[in-house]
Image (cartoon, rainbow, N blue to C red):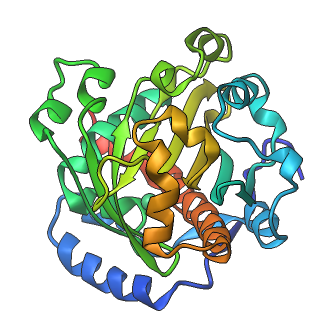
Amino acid sequence: MHLNSPPQRAPVTYVPVSMQKQLAANRRAIAGKPYERFFLPEIEVPAEGARLLRAGPMPREQTLTPSIADLGRLIDHAPDFPDHGYALLDGPTAYAQSRVVMPDVTTGMFEWWFTWHPIEKERYMLWFPQAHVDNSVVDPARLADTSLSYAERLYDNPNAIDEFIGPSSLKIVIHFAPPASLGLDEDALRRAGLTTSASGTIRVADAPDTTFMVMLHLARDTRAGMELFSRYWIGAHPEFVRFPGGRDAPALLSRLGMDTDGIERLAYEMAVHDMTEFAQLGRILPDVFATFGPT
Ligand code: ZN
C-alpha cells in the first residue's frame, strides 16, 4: 500500500438494537433541517482500528493513567501509542484511546464544530446518527458569540450530553476546561504543536459534583490533515482525586452498580464509539464547515 493512500474502511456491521431505534427517531428529528443531507447513517470505521479493538484489551504498559506524569508522556510520545485500544485499569476504570488523522480537516474547523453543534441537538446527531440523542449547554448565547475566543465560549459552560455508548444510554455533563487545569503542560503542548484541546472532566447527570470521567481531545495540524489524540478514563481511577469530587467516584460506581466486568465492557464500547464518531466527523466536517462555517 502506498504511504499516502487513505486507510481502508470497513462498514459497521453490528449496531445495538437501542441504537437502531434511535436512528429512526433521529431521522425523523432531522428531517427538514438545512444540514439534513449530512446525516449519513452508513457508518464506517478504519479496518485496522476495528482489528486492533477486537484483538482484546491492550497490555497495561501501553496504557496511560490520568496522572500528571502520564499526561506529560502522552504529549511527548503521542504517536507512539497504538491508534486504537481499550483496557481495564485500577479503580476499576474503563480506558480507551485513539489517534485519528482527518484529511482536509483543520484544528480551526474542529474548534468551530465544538461551538456550533451543541446549539441544536439535531446537529449533534450528524456526528453519530445511531448514538447521539441530545446535547445542550448552560449558556448557548455565549457558546455562539463569535466575538469571544474558543476558550471563552467553551470553558465553564457545562455541556449536557445524552448518547448511547454501545447498547447503554449515558447521560453526562462535560465540563470542558483549560488544559493546564487538567494537569497538561501548556509549554509541552505548544512544543508538540497540539494547539487545540477539547478536554475536560465529566459528571453523570444525577451526580453533578463527582468527577466520574476524564476525557482528552488534543489536536494539531499536519500535512496529512488534522491529527487528533483522544483518551478516556471512566470509573473511579485513584488519580481522580486531583479532579473536582473525584474522591467520591468509588461510592458513585457502587451506587450505579458498575462492577469490574461491566467497566471492562464499557471500555471496549467507548473505544468503538470513539472510533465510529471520529471517522464520521472526519467524513462530514469539511463539507459541513464549508456550508455553515464562518465566511
Ligand atoms: Zn459520542
Q: Quadrant of residue 172?
A: bottom left
196, above or below 278, in the image: above
**Residue at the far left in the pictured view:** 141
Q: Residue at x 43, y 46 (%)?
A: 211
170, above or below 189, in the image: below
Q: Residue at x 63, y 59 (%)?
A: 94
Would residue 187 be seen by someone viewing this image from the given angle?
yes
Q: Quadrant of ligand 1?
A: bottom left
69, above or below 122, in the image: above
Q: Residue 35 location, x and y as percent?
A: 25, 58
Q: Residue 89 location, x and y as percent?
A: 72, 55
Q: Nearer the viewer, residue 131 or 66?
A: 66
Q: Residue 49 location, x and y as percent?
A: 74, 61
Instruction: Please give the count of numbered marks on the rendered protein.
Output: 0
Q: Residue at x 50, y 64 (%)?
A: 253
Q: Residue 122 location, x and y as percent?
A: 23, 63
Would residue 103 be seen by someone viewing this image from the given angle?
no
Quadrant of the image containing the C terminus:
top left
121, above or below 254, in the image: above
Q: Nearer the viewer, residue 278 or 87?
A: 87
Q: Residue at x 65, y 55 (%)?
A: 91
Q: Quadrant of residue 86?
A: bottom right
